[in-house]
Amino acid sequence: MSFTPEDKLSRILPVVISGGRRTLKQRPTARLLPDLHGITADPVWAVMDEDAADYEPDGHEIAAYPRAWAEEYAAAHWTALKPPEPGGFLGAFAGREYACRLAEERGYWAVLQLDDNIRSISCFRHRAAGVRVAANHGGMGMYADILAALVLSTNGRMVGAFLGSVSPNRWSLKVSRPGFPYSLFVEQVGPGRENWFGPFEDDIIHAYQYGSSASPATALVVPTLIYTKETESKTGMRAKYNHERAVPLQRLFPESAKVSVHKSHSNGRGGPRVFHTMANNAIRTPMIITDQERYQRIAAYLMTLGREFTDLYRQDVRAKVSKRAARYSEPPSAGASSVS
C-alpha cells in the first residue's frame, strides 16, 4: 500500500549524513537502506571529500562535498560561541544543506535525511513486537512513504519519525503533531526551503525555523513511527559534544529553550554537563491538513498497524510469562539447599 503517488515517491532522494565513521560497522543505518530499493531514488552517503576515499563502501553512491565549500557555508551559518577554525570541526549541518542542494540539483522534490547511526525502527513502541511490525510492512520504505505522504497532505515542510530515547510527556496515538524531527525525516526542497544552521542542534534550529516563521509551513513528528540510535560510540558529532553545546540554542530561542546542568561532568572531560529542554509549544505554527482523504487513509493504516502490534506484544508477554512460570515450577535440582 502506498500513500504517496508513485511518481512522487520515486522522486525522493535518501541521503545519509556521515562524518568520521569510515567503517560500515560504525554506520548501522546501512542495514536499513535496502528497504528503500525500488521505492525511492537510490540512497546516497553524503561525506566530506577529505573522508570519502577512506569510507568503506556498501554499494551505494558516496557523494563528496568539498571542505572549502563546507567551511565557506559554515562561516555564514554558524551559531556556536566560538567561530569555526580552518580545517577544524564543522558538524553535520553543512552536510544537511548539501543533501538538500543535491536533491534540488538532481530534480527531486524531497530529501529523506538520515543520520548514519540509526540502529532500528519500530512501530508504536520500541519493543520486539514493534520492530517486527515495521519489518512486516516495508521497513524504511514504509517510513519514507508515510512521511512523504504527510508532507503532501499537511503544511509540514519537515516531517519526521519519533526518536525512541526522547520520553514524551504522554504517549500519543495522533497521526502527526507539531514537533522536532531529529535524525529521520522527509524535507521538501525547492522554493521556500530554509537554509541549515549549526554546528550543534541543527535539526532543532531547522524545525524551529519552519515552525515559527511567517510562512504557513511547520515541522511535524509522527509519534507512532519510532527509531533508535546507537549510543556507545564517541565518534562523529558525539566526539565534539561539550558544555557549550546547548547554550547557543537558548540564546537563539530564549522563550522556548531551557538550559540546565544535570551532571558535574560532560563526557568525562571535566566540564559541566549542560542539557536543554524545549517548551511544548515551541513549534508555534499549528498543523493544517490540506488533503483530508490522504490523511485519513494514513490514519486508518496506522490503526491497523496498532492492532497488529497489540496482538504481537500480547503474544510476546504471554511467552515471557510462561517461560518464567515454567522456570519457577521446576523441582529443585539434587543437592540444592532449601529454606525452611
Image: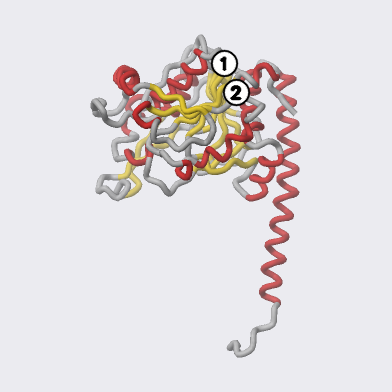
Q: Mark 1: few, some, or many residues within 10 Å (few <14, many ≥20)?
A: many
Q: Amino acid at mark 1?
A: Tyr
Q: Which mark is residue 27?
A: none
Q: Mark 2: few, some, or many residues within 10 Å (few <14, many ≥20)?
A: some
Looking at the rendered structure, the secondary structure element under dot 1 is: loop
Q: Which mark is in front, 2 or 1?
A: 2
Q: Position of residue 86 (x, y in %)?
A: 24, 25
Q: Position of residue 69 (x, y in %)?
A: 34, 18
Is 331 situated above or below 191? below
Please give the name of the residue rendered at 71% of the width and 28% of the height, measured from the top-left corner: 298
Q: Amino acid at mark 2?
A: Ala
Please give the name of the residue rendered at 75% of the width and 29% of the height, measured from the top-left corner: 1
In this view of the protein, can residue 43 be seen by the observer? yes
Looking at the rendered structure, the secondary structure element under dot 2 is: loop
Q: Position of residue 149 (x, y in %)?
A: 65, 23
The disc, 2 or 1, on the residue closer to the chain's N-terminal end is: 2
**Residue 3 occupies quadrant:** top right
Task: Name the residue carrying label 2.
Answer: 41
Q: Position of residue 53 (x, y in %)?
A: 39, 31
Task: Name the residue carrying label 1.
Answer: 108
Is 16 situated above or below 271? above
Q: How is the image coloured?
A: secondary structure
Image quarter hosting the C terminus:
bottom right
In this view of the protein, can residue 167 be seen by the observer? no
Please give the name of the residue rendered at 27% of the width and 30% of the height, measured from the top-left corner: 88
**Residue 291 occupies quadrant:** top right
Query: Is the residue under label 1 in contact with that under label 2 (CB below 8 Å)?
Result: yes
Image label count: 2
Decide which of 111, 180 is in the foreground and name it: 111
- For the residues labelled 2 and 1, the Cα–Cα distance comes to 9 Å
